[in-house]
Amino acid sequence: MRLLDRIAQTRTPLLVACGSQIVRLPSAADYASTVSTCPLRLVLTEALTRVCASLAYAEGDRLAGCLDLIHFPATRLWVEWPDRPRREAVAAALGLPFPDDAESNGLAGIYLTTDASGRRGTVRTFWGAPDGTSDPSLAPLVTDFDLDAEPRSADPIDAVFRGASARVRSDDVALETLLDSLRFRFDAAWAAYYRTEFPSPSARETVLRASLATVGTDLPVLFALCLLLSSRMRLPERRPDISRLNRRRAREGRPALLDHVVMTVPVLSAFSVEPRHEGDPRRMPRLHHVRGHLVRRGSQVFWRVPHLRGRAAFGHLRARNVTIRFEPRGPIPRAGWSSDAHPAASSRELASSAPGG
């Protein structure tokens, strides 16, 4: 079942012990009607999820250079995707280990609201177990984005648990520019719960890191989706006809499934071969594969589908990467992400799951 349907059918509140009291925390059940009435619901295929994640974190032409072209297509939007291809693509792009666990096979989704410009708004993040035996989870962190905001520093960790915001940092300059537009804050009820249950600074820092890990890499992927939606090559979309299925579910006394749009990447009958331009003095390269990528020309963004380039008569390149390995001498530094409050946060720490979510 789609994550959107599981949320729409969730009715069980999240009750937890907080001190000597039982309190109700925001959960997926609180968004059942919100998702049900959302006017635009998109479901991404594995292929499109992988493409968006690769574009968001790829080298070369960077997403940060196209931020002025990003406008979300609706003021209320639901987007969900299979999380494994996103995690694999992000891990490969950032040089991080991929945790091949059961959680990686689940579904993830966001409910997004924006202003009329489609350039600033708020995101709530959800995820669900792959077997669907438990209710979907709602991330304690709320993500705010403003694509026109000026860069600013993050607030101290303790202030984040009292309504202030955190941010994620990267040593990569282009990615840092992208992350400047994102701020993360705890839902007020979750912040109060964490203040009671985790009074020490070290415990709160651990909670913040783990919570950032669940949402910190999602929005760049959605930004890449917006670019593909606005590019000249339209993404194929399909609106499943679920009327017959819903009639049967109604006879059985089961809730109806929600309408949605399934989106994927273009599928070609064969690879295209890019010819050499007339007057080009360079020797035609050997036949090689070029992966899909973004190209910006002024105010237009093009999605170049995977294709073959070169001439087979000059040989065939099976790979364009050469890996050089050295014997390690002590710890090997990795390109990692950190919060402003603690620049030494490791990449592995930001790949864990949020507690209590």
Image (cartoon, rainbow, N blue to C red):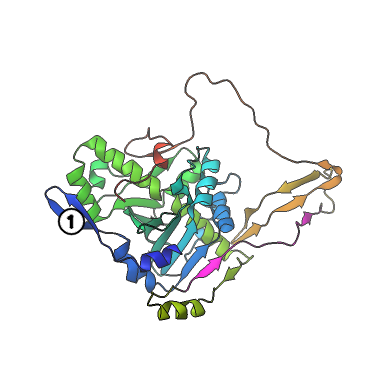
Q: Is residue 179 above or below residue 241?
A: above
- Taking the view exactly as shown, the residue that stands out farthest to the front is 252
Residues drawn in magenta: 259-275
* Residue 189 in view in this figure: yes
Indicate the amino acid at tag 1.
Val
Percent coordinates x, y for residue 354 in the rendering:
34, 46
Taking the magenta stretch, the answer to whether it contains residue 267 is yes
Percent coordinates x, y for residue 195 in the rendering:
19, 46
Residue 234, image quadrant: bottom right
Residues 261 and 142: in front is 261
Q: Residue at x 52, y 18 (%)?
A: 329
Dot 1 falls on a residue whose secondary structure is strand
Within 10 angstroms of label 1, few (less than 14), some, or many (20 or more) residues? Answer: few
Taking the magenta stretch, the answer to whether it contains residue 351 is no
Q: Residue at x 48, y 51 (%)?
A: 105
Name the residue tied to disc 1: 23
- Taking the view exactly as shown, the residue that stands out farthest to the right is 313
Q: Is residue 249 above or below residue 354?
A: below
Residue 219, image quadrant: bottom left
Judge left or right: residue 341 versus residue 274.
Answer: left
Residues 263 and 292: in front is 263
Q: Residue at x 26, y 59 (%)?
A: 26
The overriding secondary structure of the stretch rendered in magenta is loop
